[in-house]
């Protein structure tokens, strides 16, 4: 009887995870991007990065059932002015030599709404910048594109795509980046926009 | 025609200033910092993601103008170190 119960439990567990798909956000095409903007009274700074990786496991049928982590290589953050870039990555600002990664780890999905293959939700997660981790809630729009990986790879790979978009703000001072300093030229508020597509090739 | 060194330095200062200003002006008179790349907007057809394609291009900014103006004034100021050509009295 006990063996039967265990077998049923194992079967149910297998079924529960059967539909979960792992999407890899490493994008060799360089389309996945994060844009950051700082609008200070004297200066407006805008930069981007394509150095994004990470995995999100999601069940397209259950939007609340999502977990994973997005990782940004901090050294890939770029601004158009080379001197500004050197300062930004240097020890006084982001200190990328000591803190080479910026991460966002999903903890919980709240208020999810599904509309066909698209959905919105508030994602609670831990955002880590310059070694400081803080819990944030970001509004996320997700679009599931079943079978569209082949279109993107010219038929080389079959599988699904998951497009994730979000806009949120952080305060650099909260992450130990020159708190209260240079506010006239470098805004404390950083607007962050992410647009990422993850691929889940079918094995 | 032979210029005295003092005049040559002043002409050089004028050349630096005019080159710097006209380069900045004809590159779009960007009021931001000098850029070493520009971005061209693009959209991925499959995912609909908007992204920017980087294109290497030198776009002079206000720091370039300031540097050129400073250099021009330095060259102009140095011209005062050289005396005027002495005129022979009859």
Image (cartoon, coloured by chain):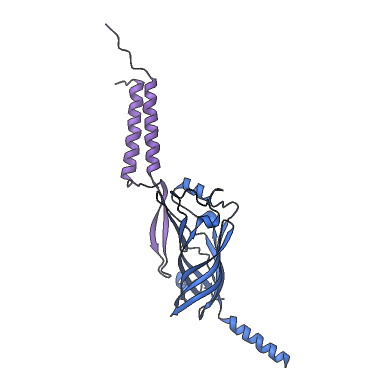
Chain colours: A blue, B purple
Residue at (47%, 75%) from the top-left corner?
A144
Above or below, comparing residue B6 to residue B22 in the picture: above
Q: Position of residue B85 (x, y in %)?
A: 33, 16
For image coordinates 32% across by 31% down, the residue present is B14
Kindly identify the residue that appears in the image at 56 percent across and 72 percent down: A67
x, y percent for residue B65: 37, 40
- Would residue A153 be seen by someone viewing this image from the given angle? no
Asked if residue A37 can be seen in this view, the reply is: yes
Residue farthest along the top direction in this orientation: B90
**Between A106 and B14, the one nearer to me in the picture:** A106
Q: Position of residue A125 (x, y in %)?
A: 55, 68
Q: Is residue A188 above or below residue B11?
A: below
Q: Position of residue A190 (x, y in %)?
A: 46, 58
Query: How many numbered tags mark residues here?
Result: 0
Q: Residue furthest left?
A: B90
Name the quadrant of the C terminus of chain A. bottom right
- The outermost residue toward the right is A2
Image: A101 above or below B27: below
Q: Nearer the viewer, residue A20 or A190?
A: A190
| Residue furthest front as drawn | A180
Give me the residue at 55% from left, 81% from top. Answer: A19
Say which of A110 and A201 sits in front: A110
Q: Is residue A157 left or right of residue B86?
A: right
Q: Quadrant of the N terminus of chain A?
A: bottom right
């Amino acid at each position: 009887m006990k063996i039967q119960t265990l077998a049923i439990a194992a079967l149910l567990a297998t079924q529960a995870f059967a539909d979960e798909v792992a999407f890899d956000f490493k994008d060799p095409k360089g389309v996945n991007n994060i844009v950051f903007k700082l609008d200070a009274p004297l200066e407006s700074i805008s930069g981007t990065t394509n150095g994004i990786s990470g995995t999100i496991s999601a069940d397209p049928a259950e939007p609340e059932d999502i977990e994973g982590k997005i990782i940004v290589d901090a050294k890939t953050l770029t601004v158009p002015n080379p001197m500004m870039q050197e300062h930004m990555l240097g020890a006084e600002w982001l200190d990328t030599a000591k803190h080479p990664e910026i991460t966002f780890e999903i903890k919980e999905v709240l208020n999810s709404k599904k509309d066909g293959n698209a959905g919105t939700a508030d994602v609670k997660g831990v955002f880590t910048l310059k070694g400081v981790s803080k819990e944030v809630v970001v509004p996320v729009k997700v679009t599931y594109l079943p079978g569209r990986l082949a279109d993107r790879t010219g038929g080389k790979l079959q599988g699904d795509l998951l497009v994730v978009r979000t806009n949120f703000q952080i305060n650099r001072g909260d992450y130990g980046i020159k708190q209260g300093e240079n506010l006239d030229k470098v805004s404390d508020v950083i607007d962050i926009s992410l647009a990422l597509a993850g691929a889940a090739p079918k094995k | 025609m032979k210029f005295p060194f003092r005049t040559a330095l002043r002409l050089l200062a004028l050349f630096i200033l005019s080159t710097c200003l006209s380069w900045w002006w004809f590159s779009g008179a960007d009021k931001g910092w000098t850029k070493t790349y520009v971005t061209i907007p693009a959209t991925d057809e499959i995912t609909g993601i908007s992204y920017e394609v980087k294109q290497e291009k030198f776009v002079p900014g206000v720091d370039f103008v300031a540097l050129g103006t400073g250099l021009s004034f330095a060259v102009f100021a140095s011209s005062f170190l050289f005396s005027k050509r002495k005129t022979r009295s009859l």
